[in-house]
Amino acid sequence: MPWLGITINTATLFGFILVLGIVVDDAIVISEHVDKLQRQGLPPLQAAIEGTRRMAVPITFGVLTTVMAFLPMVFEKGDWARMFQPIALVFVTVMLIALVETKIILPAHLAHPFMEPVMKHLAPFYNFTDGCLQWVITRLYRPSIRWSLDHRYTVLAIFFGGLLLLCGFFFGGRILFVKFPRIDSERIEARLTMLDGTPFEVTDRHIARIYEIGEQLRREYVGPDGRPVIRHILATTGTTRLTGSTGGSGGVSHLGEVNMECYGPEERSLKIRTPDIANEWRRRIGQIVGAEELNFRAEILRSGDPIDVQLSGTNPQELLALSSQIKDKLGQYRGVFDIADSLDSGRNEIQLRLKPEARQFGVTVNDLARQVRQAFYGFEVQRIQRGRNEVKVMVRSPRNERRNLATLDTMRVRLADGLELPFSSVAEIKVDKSFTSIRRVDRRRALNVTADVDKSSTDVAVVRAGLSEYLNELMAAHPHVHWSFEGEARSERESASAGWMALITVGLGLYAMMAIPFKSYTQPLIVLLVIPFGVVGAVLGHLFHGMPVSMMSLFGMLAVSGVIVNDTLVLVDEINSQRDETGDLEMAAREGGAARFRAILLTQITTFFGLVPLIFDNSPQSTHNQFLLPVSVAMGYGSLFATVITLYLVPLSYLAVDDLLGLFRKQPRKAATIASPDDNGAVVRA
C-alpha cells in the first residue's frame, strides 16, 4: 500500500471487506475438491496436488476476470475518484496475491493437516453436518434440478420474468435510486452571503445571531449522560475558508460562516443525525433581510447541487426574470430547499447618458466620464518626494461638494475649445441597479439556479423530470435562452458516459478471458447471462431493509458479480469435464451441480454470515457504516440469491444454449449409454 500511495482508511478497509468474500471463495473451492479426493482414498499430499491442479484453471481465470472488472475504477476520474481508486487498488492487489497463496501456500497446508488431532475430536460433528449436506443434495437438489432440466424453458421463463418485473419496478421509480447518497458529516456548516458591498458590521451582526442560535442548540441537544451532541462552534466574518472548500474567499465584508463540530454517532448518547440538527438550525434562523444566500451543509463527498439549472443568453434582465419563475416552480416541490441563483439583485449606481444635442458640441462618453471622475475622485497633477515616500497632489472639488450628488446638477462640462456647458444640457442622470459581477459561458451571459433536495424523502430524478417539462414549455417563449442541468446532473452524465464505455470494454474483456479456458464462443455467454440475476438478490435486500439503491450499492453488486463469475466458472468447468467423460450433456449438467453443490453453498453462506455484523449493525448513522451498509446489503443478499442462480440457472442455460446450437447441427446429438445415479443415489443405466 505505501508503494501505491494509499493508507489504511475507510476506503481501503472498504476494499478489504469487498475482496474478503471472493478470496475465501477461491480457498473454499480448492479445499473442497482436495477434501473430496481425500475421501475417495487419495493420500493428503497427492490429493492436495491433484485437487489444486484440477481447479487451477477455473480459479485463475475467475480471479483474472474479477480483476478486470475492477480495473476501470483504478483509472476513475472525477469527484469520487479519491473514494474509488483506493478500493480498486486494494481489491486488485489482494486478488493477485491471493492467487499465488491459493496455488502454493494453501495446498501445502492441505497436504500436511497439522490440525488432524483436533479434527479427530470433531469427527462426530463433521460426519453429522456432512450427512445433512448429502441428504440435501440427494433428497432435495437432485429431484428439483432433474425436474427443472425436464421443464427448462418454463423455469427459464420464470427467471427472466422475475428479472423483467424487477427492471419494471426499478425504471418505473418504485425502487428509489440515489446515485450520490448523502453521507452525514460530523461538521455542520452555515454559510451566509449578503449583498455585495454590505458593511462588515452588518454581516457580523447576522453571523453573531446565527452563532447564538447554534449555542442554544448546543445547550438543548444533550444526551442522558450529560454530554452535548455539539462539541465546538466557530464563527468567522469576512471569510469562508474554514471548511477548505475550493470556493472559499477571504477579506470580503459580505461573507460569513459558522461551523459546528459534532461528536461522532458512536459517541452520542442522544441519537440524532446532523442533517436534522442543520434543519432545526435553519428553521430557527428564518429569513435574513438582505441575504443573497444562506446555505447549510451537513454531508461529505458532495459532487454539486442536486438541482442546478444553467441559463445562458444575451439579455441579463431576461435571465433574471426567468430565474425568478424557476425558483417559484422549485418552491412547489416537496423536499426542495436552499433555492438560490448565482447572481445578486445588483447594487444601485448612477448611470450617465449623453443627450443627442451633446454630440453637436463634440462631447463624448469618455469626456463626460473623465471629467466626473476628476471632480469627485480627483486628477493627479504632481508627485512630491518626501524622504522615502511620495505625496500625490490631487485637484478635485471641495469635500462638501463631493459628498452631495446634487453637485452633478451644478457641474459644468468643459468642451474641447475651452467653453463650458451646464451638466444638465449635455447629459442626464439615472439611478439603476447593476450586476456586481458578470459570468459568461461560451461568450453568453450565464446564470445558475440551484437548490438542495432531501434525498431521503424526495427522488431527485422525479424533480428533474418535472422541471425539465416546465423549462421546455417556459423556453418556448424565449428562443434565445439556452438551459441545461449542471452540478450533480453533469457529474452523473459524465460518469454514465464513462461507465458505458467501461462496461463495454470490461464485457468484451471478460468474454475473451472466459473463452480461453472454456475453448468455446458460446459458454462465456452463459456466465455473462447469469450476472444480471445476481443483482436481483442485491436489490431485494435493499427493499427488505427499506434502503435506496446507491453508488455504494453498485460496488456490492460488482463484488457479488465476482462471486457469481467464480462459482459459475467452476460449475461450467465441472459440467464440461463430466460431459467429456460421459458424453451425456443432461446428466453432466445435473451431476455437475451436485458435485459442486457443497463448494458453491459454502462460498455463498460464508460470504453472507461474514457480512451479517455490518448488515445488522445497531449504529446505522455511523459515518463508516453509511459507506459500508449498502455494500454489505448488496453483497450479503446477493450472495444468498446467487446460490439459487448458480445451482439452477447455469445448468438450465447450458442446456438451452446447446438446444439453440442444435438447431444448426446437421445431426442430432446422441445420448450415451452410461451409468448415472438416480435421485436416491442408486446407479441406473441411462
Image: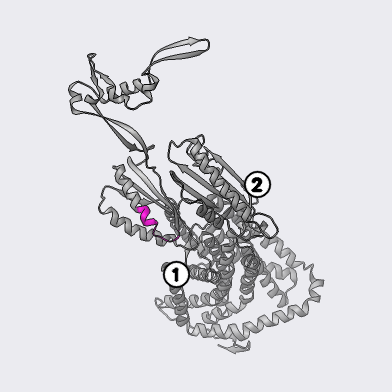
Residue 265's image quarter?
bottom right
Question: Is 495 displayed left or right of 95 in the figure?
Answer: left
- For residue 669, say whether it is visible: no
Count neighbours of disc 2 (C-alpha within 10 A) and say few if under 14, some if 14 to 19, many if 20 or more: few
Q: Is residue 405 above or below residue 237?
A: above
Q: Position of residue 414 (x, y in %)?
A: 26, 17
Give the residue type at disc 2. Pro
Residue for badge 2 = 2
Residue segment shown in magenta = 326-335
Helix, strand or loop status at disc 1: loop
| Residue 174: numbered disc | 1
Give the residue type at disc 1. Arg
How much space separates mark 2 and mark 1, taking CA atoms? 44 Å
User: Of 149 and 636, which appears nearest the observer?
Assistant: 636
Q: Position of residue 569 (x, y in %)?
A: 56, 68
User: Of 613 and 572, which appears nearest the observer?
Assistant: 613
Q: Which mark sits nearer the N-terminus, 2 or 1?
A: 2
Q: Is residue 518 magenta-colored?
A: no
User: Of 594 and 276, which appears nearest the observer?
Assistant: 276
